[in-house]
Image: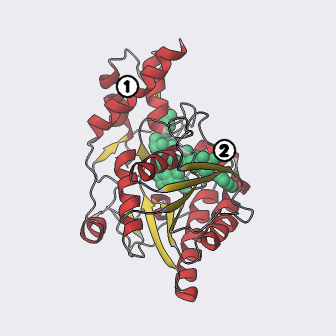
Amino acid sequence: MVFSHAVVTGGAGFVGARLCAKLLEAGARVTAVDNLSTARPGALDAVAGHPRFRLLEHDVTKPIPVPGAVDVVFHLASPASPRDYLRLPLETLRVGSIGTENALAAARGARFVLASTSEVYGDPLEHPQRETYWGNVNPIGPRSVYDEAKRYAEALTSATRRGEGANTGIARIFNTYGPGMRADDGRMVPAFITKALAGEPLTVEGSGRQTRSLCFVDDTVDGLLALARSDHPGPVNLGNPDELSVREIAERVIAITGSASRIEHVDPAVDDPRRRCPDISLARRELGWAPRIPAGEGLRRTAEWFAARRAAAA
Ligand code: NAD
Ligand code: UDP
């Protein structure tokens, strides 16, 4: 299915910019709506001059003035890295609540895809996580501004579907990484790669035995597109079930970059989820989607991208 006009809130962000590029490749007209609060400067350079692309610099907590008819709205606007949402706690709650309400209104009559997160599972007591699991979130801890905002966004999306018959789909995205991330966003992959390239110690928070499942950005974007083209309501997990410990990811980054950096352990993050691994049976069955890029390949491509930027800046 070819979309004629797609709106991407958070379209200047890491995942959003890649999604905009893929939508343009597929022939769509694309409007990115973004207030640039956590975007990497230059993220949209590759698409900025495209005749079918437009950036609307706008805060989605205010009603969204969408130009013309729309057939799909992807709602990605939200700080996403722990460093960003801990710095922007109220903004994160507002974009998940008021921002989602405005994005749903902009999608009236169109397909709506919510970028939710594996964080709705909190520190999970069920492993791997299936969509039927209700989660284990601390509602008052520092991470709650993000976790609960996304849980509220899911509730709002579901209520709008039930009450107004809206055509909605919820994606629960697991840790996504790749070229295009901000070097200073504080997330594990850019932090480890930039430190390895600089020959500085990689700081592993806590024991490093906590796990994450890393999904390459192109795979995540393909999953979002597959959900948009379906009429499945979700929630559907989008992630790579290859589960690795954080310590192992640090070691892989050191090996891939050929770095002489060592690993240093620092205090654990508050309420850090101990395990994270998606069960993706639903996405395989309903969307015909599964990730294609293994962690080794994705980390190599990401490290090459960061190394090229470092070389250009030097
Ligand atoms: P990002 O921070 O790179 O991108 C988010 C974008 O939203 C930024 O460009 C930012 O400027 C914009 N934004 C924030 N608040 C806004 C507002 N009020 N109005 C308009 N724009 C606003 O993050 P990302 O990694 O690209 O994540 C994109 C989406 O996917 C987020 O909703 C995030 O919660 C979700 N997600 C991402 C991951 C991941 O690992 N990358 C995992 C799970 C869920
Ligand atoms: N982490 C780390 N060192 C860093 C950044 C993150 O050890 O420099 C750990 C963090 O404590 C967590 C995991 O890596 O256990 C993933 O963190 P990230 O911020 O990438 O995403 P999260 O899954 O917590 O949202």
Q: Picture coordinates of residue 279 (x, y %)?
A: 30, 63
Q: Left of 251 or right of it: where is 32? A: right
Residue type at mark 1: give it: Glu
Q: Left of 70 or right of it: where is 128? A: left
Residue that protrudes farthest toward the bottom in the picture: 163
Q: Quadrant of residue 156?
A: bottom right
Q: Residue at x 36, y 17 (%)?
A: 259
Q: Residues within 10 Å of mark 2 (few under 14, many from 20)?
A: some
Sequence-earlier tag: 1 or 2: 2
Vertical order, 40 against 99 (above or below):
above
Q: Is residue 204 visible?
A: no
Specify whether tag 2 is near ligand 1 (CB below 8 Å).
yes
Between 118 and 58, the one nearer to me in the picture: 58
Label 1 residue SS: helix
Residue that protrudes farthest toward the front in the picture: 51
Between 125 and 61, the one nearer to me in the picture: 61
Position of the N terminus by quadrant: bottom left
Q: Is residue 164 visible?
A: yes
Q: Picture coordinates of residue 276 (x, y %)?
A: 38, 54
Residue type at mark 2: give it: Leu
Label 2 residue SS: loop
Q: Picture coordinates of residue 309 (x, y %)?
A: 48, 22
Residue that protrudes farthest toward the top in the picture: 314
Numbered tag placed on residue 304 in the rendering: 1
Q: Residue at x 53, y 79 (%)?
A: 158
Give the residue pinned by disc 2. 36
